[in-house]
Image (spheres, grey):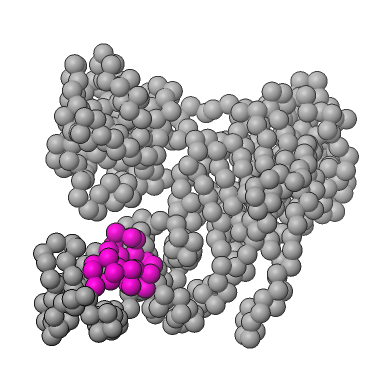
Amino acid sequence: MLSRLQEFLLLPAETEWIEFKEAKSNLDFDDIGRYFSALSNEASLNGEAAGWLIFGVTDKPPRKIVGSNYCLMPPGLEHLKQKIGQQTNHQMTFHAIHEIAVNGMRVIMFEIPPALRGVPTTWRRVAYGRTHDSLEPLGLHEIDRIRAPLPDWSAEICDGATIADLDPEAIAFARAKYKKKHQDLAEEIDEWDDATFLNKAKVCRDGKITKTAILLLGKGEAGHYLLPAIARITWVLRNDAEIEIDYAHFDQPLILAVDKVFEKIRNLTIRHISEETLFPTEVSQYDRWVVREALHNCIAHQDYQQSARITVTERPDSLMFTNRGDFIPGTVRTVIERDMPPDWYRNPFLANAMVELNMIDTIGSGIKRMFSKQRDRYFPMPDYDLSEERVVRVTILGRVIDEKYTRMLIRRKDLTLMDVITLDKVQKGISITPEERRILRKKQLIEGRSPNLRVSVGVAAETDMRADYIRKRSLDKAHFKGLVMAYLKTYREAKRSDIEDLLFNKVSDALNDEQKYHFIRDLLQEMRKEGTIRAVGRTKAATWVLASDKPHKS
């Protein structure tokens, strides 16, 4: 990121999509929001991958790094990221916030995603742009440029292709799926010839074969119509050591490939030992609907122009689905909370055809249903990894982390799906945002200091996790004081290092090493003030003895 900053510093003047600010102290929140909208829109208009708001640099050439204290104190930059998302359309927020040190001075680089194609980014319902150094509402012609319809790769006609290039078995399968969705038309559908059916199902256009038709229904040898795009799903099996032990490729017709991939997956039956009848005795590792939905989402949202394949990586207790292309909604939270279709799709013609063929739910609802399905099966939530640019990875775990804990979550009617998703992160040891922590603390579901959060005693009691809770929380100080007193009564004296050896592994493992040492130091000082022990010497190497005793002389 330092090299990127140096590149920006050499620009002759501020561009429409980069803004420098000294920002030695806090700026007006609305100003930052307006810059977010403007730089997002300008990045889109200029074909840039991101807009940049940079704090800690003078705004006029020759630019100098002066450092910035903006949001240096809690709640910090992560809180700002959340607040921005609350006032933009689509809950857009910074793609990333980079803090770097240059000669001991702090520079903050806010990476702002470009406006979603076809939809200008708004701040408090106003779309901003830049005119020289000023922030002003976007002009109508600029809004029209952003809203200009994009070419849809999946709707393109494959010149020279005919129905003969489509797989008869795939067409028959598609008919059955279409009839299931449109049961009121079942008799009429049987009367349609293939050309009529394909048009009605929105797979073809005016009798012409589209790239969507080849993707979903095409024969294997018809793949050349899609070049340089690839219509392929690759299944890879890895063992615990991450060694590849098997693989298989599945090309078009992709409508048939999904079941073939599922047949490859080792969907074992898990037997639960439980005295309660609420939890099933036997359950499969992976829900068939969830696996299909994950694969169908990969097919619908793959950026085929990257000429990459969709991959399914199977490990002993998980499945990972990978497809190319940015995650259009931005965040999983946006999908869950908004619960409505996004304003645009990468492959709208393909997505609509898949809805017609009953492959995916009404567009936009499938992801939320995946989470609900996992919740209802008492399994961990899907994990979305969006850390790599233009790549989406979704991992489905095929094991229960804690049966009783998960069952309690299902019984708690006051918990929203987002509460369950956030608690699932805590259970997995994944960091959560300050706002998520606030919500869980308010409901008394977690305790401890970030990042060492743990299940609260209330939840632990309800789920029979008391033993784990006792291990993770700090025991009563009286217990540790008693250990120190017993040691000194036995050995008459102890160095600080002796007491650290005595207590270190007994102090809560919710604390890191440094916090454990501080806890032991404070405990000794508290005992000294209480008059139960005293130190001989004034340094860390001092000897500790009982207050009523004298140092032991050998």
* Farthest-out residue, front: 554
- Kindly identify the residue that appears in the image at 27 percent across and 65 percent down: 497
Image quadrant where one finds the N terminus: top left
Can you name the residue that lies furthest to the top here?
Answer: 12
Q: Is residue 486 visible?
A: yes
Where residue 166 appears, x then y in whole percent?
A: 84, 34
Q: For this rendering, which residue is in front, 166 or 95?
A: 95
Whether residue 553 sits left or right of residue 171 in the image: it is left
Check if residue 510 falls in the magenta segment: yes
Magenta segment's dominant SS is helix
Q: Position of residue 16 (x, y in %)?
A: 31, 22
Q: Nearer the viewer, residue 284 or 373?
A: 284
Q: Position of residue 206 (x, y in %)?
A: 75, 30
Q: Is residue 213 visible?
A: no
In the rendered structure, the answer to whether residue 41 lies left or right of residue 185 reads: left
Residue displayed at 65% across by 50% down: 241
Would residue 411 appear left or right of 282 to someone viewing this image? left
Q: Is residue 520 above or below residue 311?
A: below
Vertical placement of 404 versus 95: above or below? below
Foreground of the two, 505 or 269? 505
> Can you say whether 278 is above or below 382 in the image?
below
Q: Residue at x 52, y 35 (%)?
A: 390
Residue bounds of the magenta highlight: 494-517
Q: Quadrant of residue 198?
A: top right
Residue 516: percent from left, percent from top: 30, 65
Question: In the rendered view, would you say 77 is above or below 382?
Answer: above
Please report the residue visible at 83 percent of the width from the left and 48 percent of the height from the top. Answer: 173
Q: How many marks?
A: 0
